[in-house]
Amino acid sequence: MTIAWNQFTPWGALVGGLLIGLASALYLLGNGRIAGIAGIVASPLRAMFSGTSLLPERTRLLFLGGLFGSPWVWRLFAPLPVASVDVGSLGLVAAGLFVGFGVRMGNGCTSGHGVCGLSRFSLRSLANVLAFMGAGFVTVFVLRHVV
Amino acid sequence: MRNLIALFSGLIFGFGLIAGGMTDPAKVKGFLDLFGAWDPSLALVMGGAIAVGVFAFAAARRRTRSWTGDLMEIPSSTVIDMRLIVGGVLFGIGWGIGGFCPGPALVAMGSGLGSAWLFVAAMVAGMLLHDRIFKSR
């Protein structure tokens, strides 16, 4: 293992992390909810496909609206950082299917189990985080250094 | 009020992901490439978020209701079972392939990144497929 010092952005990462923490704190203390993105996406989706009312989902939809709209507001003040994707369409579809299926099965993702779960010292969340981090490390190792 | 809180939470969450560089799948993969040239940035993003989160959850535990008067919905399950672990592993495989997890993908989608739209469409399909097979909550 070598550290990619030229890629490492400690200050941006730390500020970004603090903002994510603040947003989760606001949602938790303000609305009494966990800011877990997988759950916030899945819940209105379920309502939509089961034909029940979307009205109880409106706070979740607004949270998603804020996420979706954040780059637009950001662009008013600063240019967005570049994003580069190194997989083709087939890879993206496979990635999406795995992520969607996995976060539903494990009941959370990087935000729900990662940020919120670890913040409340949940062993259940830690187990999930170790599973997805481990699988992520192995997957990138295989794709970059084996195949 | 709760609508405004939700909107602002989402907005600030998105700013955090952008500031932390997490909307760039290449950067996320740089973190996951533990055995290559490793970029530890993602660990600091999570560390920073948890540093604030620890205080938020400590404060939340002392309350029964939120500022807007809703009951606090803090997960109570402590079950560690196969679903939790297999779900995590499947998520990790997808995360490693694409470099996207749900939050950053939605922000990248908002920024107009075509790949993120395709990823999110597949992610939604994956969620629906899971719920169809397991008919769970």
Image: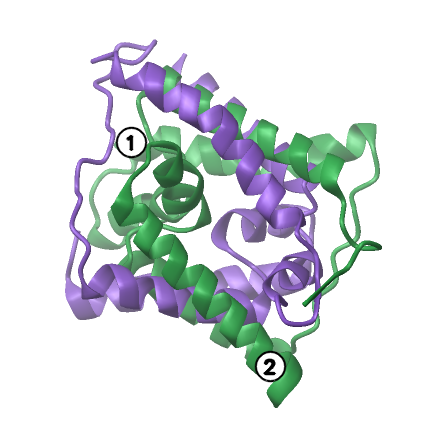
Image height check: is B57 above or below B80? above
The residue located at (46%, 60%) in the rendering is A133
The residue located at (41%, 64%) in the rendering is B91
Q: Which residue is mark 2?
A: A143
Please tell me the numbered disc located at residue A55. 1
Supply the letter of whichever chain is purple. Answer: B
Image height check: is A90 above or below A147? above
**Residue at the front extreme of this rendering:** A1
Image height check: is B51 above or below A125? above
Viewer-nearest of discs 1 and 2: 2
Tint of chain A: green
Q: Amino acid at mark 2?
A: Leu
Mark 2: give few (<14), some (14-19) or many (20+) Cα within 10 Å: few
Q: Is residue A5 visible?
A: yes
The kind of secondary structure element at disc 2 is helix
Q: Amino acid at mark 1?
A: Leu
Query: Pointer 1 indicates a residue of which chain?
Result: A
Q: Nearer the viewer, residue A69 or A19?
A: A19
State the image quarter where residue A67 is shown: top right
> Residue B25, image x and y in percent?
65, 60
- CA distance for labels 1 and 2: 43 Å
Left or right of B111: which side holds B120? left
Label whose residue precedes the other's in the sequence (1 or 2): 1
The kind of secondary structure element at disc 1 is helix
Left or right of B109: which side holds A33? left
Please tell me the numbered disc located at residue A16. none
Please tell me if label 1 and label 2 are on a single chain: yes
Q: Nearer the viewer, residue B131 or B96?
A: B96
The residue located at (22%, 63%) in the rendering is B83
